[in-house]
Image: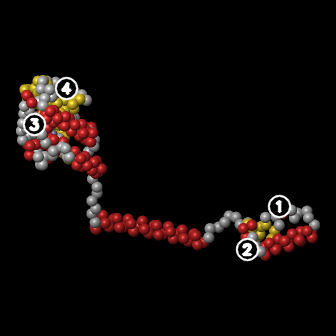
Amino acid sequence: MFSTNKGKVIAPKSCGAKGRTISASIKLKKKTQNVVRFAPIFRTAITVNKSPVPKPKNEIKARKRAKCIDFYYTIVQRLQAWWYNHYMIWEAKPAPFRKFKKRVWEQCAVVSDFIYQIGEYPELRQKSKEVFLKKINEKVVQKKFVYLKKCLLNYRKLTGYGRGITAVQVGIPERYSVIFYNDELLLIVNPHITKISKKKYLYPEMCMSANPIIAPTVRPAWIEFTYYDEKGEKKFWNTKDDTEIGKMMNRVFQHEIDHMEGIINIDRVSSPKDLILQSDPTFYDSAKFEEI
Ligand SMILES: [Zn+2]
């Protein structure tokens, strides 16, 4: 309502002083003086006409000081980093695929509950026993078949891959395997290779029992073999499909039949230097069959 300028009281136009009698304006002046006298009490009602408001000197000083301190600390930090890098401390840097490796090791720990690993089960390096075909329909044998199928499905569920599994890998040293083929589980019992191709391919393979090692393995492009299904009927595999799936299936059969002979893919590598520790999540995206 009132405004002051350097201690003087001015009645603003909005007060209505203009146009009144002198005595009235004097009375009004007295009134305003009284208000100013008690100004501390009504301070909230008084506005000071000062524009623009200059920043207090103390604030400017404080900002300058803060800037100086920031600059000082950046210089000190850089000097420290330079000193540590050159003279004092070498700090190890984490591996680029550490997250993926951690996941792989966690998977290994989980699947090793039911997949036997090399080094802990000597039968993995020995020939497995043939299944007695007359007893193939017995409950015990059928129960083992079901268990092996469950193991493969469980492995696939846990890891997202896994095309074949052999009985010896789950602690049953007998000659049969389950292969994931055309979205179905194919059981092969007592397989016997009859023919091998001369053409050979190199392909990086992984084995559930030697996890997480990848072994670039040379194998024939295709094989022919006889086997028995879960009901004991004799069958013949001679699919020489040259597509990626065909090449893969022929390879998976060879890998699983090797298990029955006590051979693991890492044994087929000429030098341990060729072995790869699974580290790159995109490894199999770029993996291709190379003819040798
Ligand atoms: Zn294997």
Residue carrying label 2: 40
Per the image, label 1 sits on a secondary structure element best described as helix
The residue mark sitting in front, 2 or 1, is 2
Asked if disc 3 is less than 8 Å from ligand 1, the answer is no
Report whether 86 appears left or right of 51. left
Which residue is outermost to the bottom? 37
Dot 2 or dot 1: first in sequence order is 1
Residue 66 is tagged as none
Q: Which amino acid type corresponds to the residue marked 2 in the rendered image?
A: Pro
Asked if disc 2 is less than 8 Å from ligand 1, the answer is no
Residue 71 image offset from top left, x and y in percent: 45, 67
Which residue is outermost to the front? 139
Dot 4 or dot 1: first in sequence order is 1
Ligand 1, seen in the image, is in the quarter at top left
Quadrant in the picture for the C terminus: top left
On screen, 252 above or below 52?
Answer: above
Label 4 crowding class (10 Å Cα cut-off): few <14, some 14-19, many 20+? few
Q: Which amino acid type corresponds to the residue marked 3 in the rendered image?
A: Glu
Quarter occupied by residue 227: top left
Residue carrying label 1: 14
Residue carrying label 3: 174
Q: CA distance from mark 1 to mark 3?
A: 108 Å
Q: How many marks?
A: 4
Label 2 crowding class (10 Å Cα cut-off): few <14, some 14-19, many 20+? few
Residue carrying label 4: 242
Q: Which amino acid type corresponds to the residue marked 1 in the rendered image?
A: Ser
Q: CA distance from mark 3 to mark 4?
A: 31 Å
Q: CA distance from mark 2 to mark 4?
A: 99 Å
Report the front residue among 58 and 208. Answer: 208
